[in-house]
Amino acid sequence: MLTHAISKPILIVTILLVIQTFYTTTKAQNCGCSPDLCCSQFGFCGSTSDYCGVGCQQEPCFAPPPANGVSVDEIVTQEFFNGIIDQIESSCASNGFYSR
């Protein structure tokens, strides 16, 4: 009977430790940075390339350089973008969601 009485508290403590471990791991992956800071690949908040560059986990991350040397701004001009956006019905839920 004594073994059962000791086992139950150990089981409860073990379960709580497992839950704490998962909670801490999940929280570290999301960083909890303020909206104007990036989350680095190591889970720290900041605004330099160390945080917002390679491995950035949370916006606002820096965009990688274009592979072909051409930027989206050179391909999709403001006029072209506006032409697409102007076709959206005013009642559409996504109206005003997209921007360039």
Image: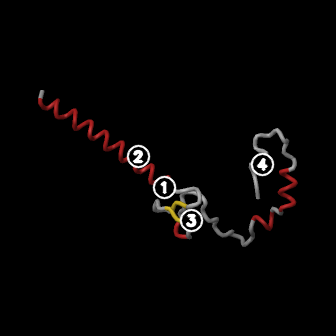
* Residue 96: mark: 4
> In the rendered structure, which disc, 1 or 4, sits on the residue that comes first in sequence?
1
Amino acid identity at mark 4: Gly
Residue at the spot of label 3: 52
Separation (CA) of disc 2 from disc 3? 24 Å
Left or right, residue 31 beside residue 35: left
Left or right, residue 42 beside residue 49: left
Separation (CA) of disc 1 from disc 3? 13 Å
Query: Dot 4: few (<14), some (14–19), or many (≥20) neighbours within 10 Å?
Result: few
Q: Residue at x 50, y 52 (%)?
A: 30
**Residue 76 point in image, percent of width and height:** 81, 62
> In the rendered structure, which disc, 2 or 3, sits on the residue that comes first in sequence?
2
Q: Where, by quadrant of the figure, is residue 49 drawn?
A: bottom right
| Element marked by disc 3 | helix
> In the rendered structure, which disc, 2 or 1, sits on the residue that comes first in sequence?
2
Residue at the spot of label 2: 23
| Element marked by disc 4 | loop
Find the residue positioned furthest to the top.
1
Q: Are marks 1 and 4 in contact (CB under 8 Å)?
A: no
Q: Residue at x 40, y 50 (%)?
A: 24
> In the rendered structure, which disc, 1 or 3, sits on the residue that comes first in sequence?
1
Query: Dot 2: few (<14), some (14–19), or many (≥20) neighbours within 10 Å?
Result: few
Q: Are marks 3 and 4 in contact (CB under 8 Å)?
A: no
Q: Is residue 55 above or below residue 9?
A: below
